[in-house]
């Protein structure tokens, strides 16, 4: 998919599965994942694509597969003929498909809702029953051969009927999902505390157990080369050395951000290519932020402290002995998988 030979395990649909609560690892085969890198997911649903950027939502437990609309339904977009995960504005330069944020799965009462993010800032969404992707509007600045969005979206989330996006500088914007054609409303920017030695910060969005909007800033230094062993570029994995993390909660009544050091309810937060979620299980440390695919590691764990600091642990997870994907190099992108009831909610 990235111009190199796709390893045999990918073409056959193998992947490694690690149960962090039990410390058990397995090598798993799933026919639905043949030849398809995953680019997003939520719970036990994964979004897969191919070199033509055709996308499906797949349930790894039931095998159900649901196609998403073609990206060519976005006005002015055509699909690249190359082997890269790219689309093109007609007659102009290419833009790369970064990820799909699966905000709601087909198991939810109202069906699935998905956001698609591109490396030039283009952001669109589709939901169950739609035949097209709807493009979110924000102001453009003309740079070079095509119109490049000034808001380069690093992460996005659905929150109380609005789509919230954060850029690489920590600025947040909000769209009413009913009116994607309108310009977004800017939100206040959290006041970050400098961490000694840090020169960069990358951002995630999530919701607290009390349904409050959170922004998570991971600080670090020394930019690292992009991982050549991945089929999907991870914009959150650009810092070689990770120094710490800061969490801020949005106070809607005042329109301001408040720094927090406790997630609450003994929960921990799980971030990555998956939609963010909370959990509290045996074997899981409370009040931690678990981030998949960061700093060159499968998982980084940030144990939040009362003084605002965080203890950092690195984890590289093995797969079953004798199986493939044992050498630490996998073209699959590590992400969190959370089994749920396979039947639709009533």
Image: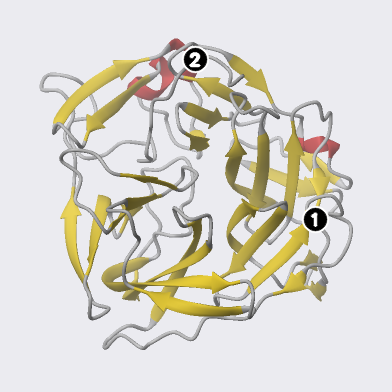
Q: Secondary structure at mark 2?
A: helix
Residue 179 image point, x, y percent: 87, 54
Image mark for residue 112 = none
Residue 82 image point, x, y percent: 65, 37
Q: How is the image coloured?
A: secondary structure
Q: Are marks 2 and 1 in contact (CB under 8 Å)?
A: no
Quadrant of the image containing the C terminus: top right
Q: Nearer the viewer, residue 228 or 269?
A: 269
Seen at 44% across and 60% down, the residue is: 236
Q: Choose the circle earlier in sequence order: 2 or 1.
A: 2
Seen at 29% across and 67% down, the residue is: 240
How far is disc 2 from disc 1 in space, using C-alphas? 31 Å
Seen at 72% across and 51% down, the residue is: 161
In the image, taking residue 80 as reference, residue 329 lies left or right, namely: left
Residue designated by label 2: 32
Residue 180 image point, x, y percent: 84, 54
Seen at 67% across and 75% down, the residue is: 187
Residue designated by label 1: 136
- Determine if residue 84 is in view: no
- Determine if residue 152 is in view: yes
In the image, taking residue 89 as reference, residue 339 lies left or right, namely: left
Dot 2 surroundings within 10 Å: few (below 14), some, or many (20 or more)? some
Nearer the camera: disc 2 or disc 1: 1
Residue 45 image point, x, y percent: 50, 27
In the image, taking residue 326 as reference, residue 166 lies left or right, namely: right
Vertical comparison of 110 with 147: above or below: above
In the image, taking residue 149 as reference, residue 84 lies left or right, namely: left
Q: Nearer the viewer, residue 128 or 331?
A: 128
Q: Secondary structure at mark 1?
A: loop
């Amino acid at each position: 998919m990235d111009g190199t030979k796709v390893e045999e395990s990918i073409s056959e649909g193998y992947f490694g599965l690690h149960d962090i609560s039990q410390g058990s690892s397995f090598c798993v085969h799933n026919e639905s994942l043949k030849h398809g890198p995953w680019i997003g997911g939520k719970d036990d649903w994964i979004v897969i694509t191919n070199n033509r950027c055709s996308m499906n939502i797949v349930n790894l437990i039931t095998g159900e597969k649901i196609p998403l609309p073609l990206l060519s339904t976005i006005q002015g977009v055509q699909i690249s003929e190359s082997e890269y995960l790219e689309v093109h504005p007609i007659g102009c330069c290419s833009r790369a498909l970064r990820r799909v944020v699966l905000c709601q799965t087909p198991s939810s009462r109202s069906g699935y809702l998905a956001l698609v993010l591109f490396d030039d800032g283009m952001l669109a969404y589709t939901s169950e029953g739609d035949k097209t992707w709807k493009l979110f509007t924000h102001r453009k600045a003309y740079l070079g051969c095509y119109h490049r969005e000034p808001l380069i979206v690093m992460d996005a989330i659905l929150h109380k009927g609005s789509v919230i996006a954060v850029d690489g500088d920590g600025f947040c914007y909000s769209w009413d999902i009913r009116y994607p054609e309108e310009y977004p409303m800017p939100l206040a920017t959290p006041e970050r505390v400098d961490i000694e030695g840090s020169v960069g910060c990358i951002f995630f969005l999530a919701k607290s157990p009390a349904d409050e909007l959170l922004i998570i800033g991971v600080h670090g230094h020394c930019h690292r080369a992009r991982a050549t062993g991945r089929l999907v570029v991870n914009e959150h994995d650009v810092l070689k050395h990770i120094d710490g993390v800061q969490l801020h909660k949005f106070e809607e009544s005042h329109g301001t951000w408040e720094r927090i050091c406790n997630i609450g309810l003994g929960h921990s937060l799980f971030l990555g290519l998956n939609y963010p979620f909370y959990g509290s299980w045996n074997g899981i440390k409370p009040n931690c932020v678990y981030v998949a695919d960061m700093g060159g590691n499968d998982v980084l764990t940030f144990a939040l402290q009362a003084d605002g600091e965080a203890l950092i642990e690195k984890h590289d997870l093995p797969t079953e002995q004798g199986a493939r994907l044992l050498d630490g190099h996998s073209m699959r992108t590590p992400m969190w998988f959370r089994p749920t009831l396979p039947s639709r909610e009533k």
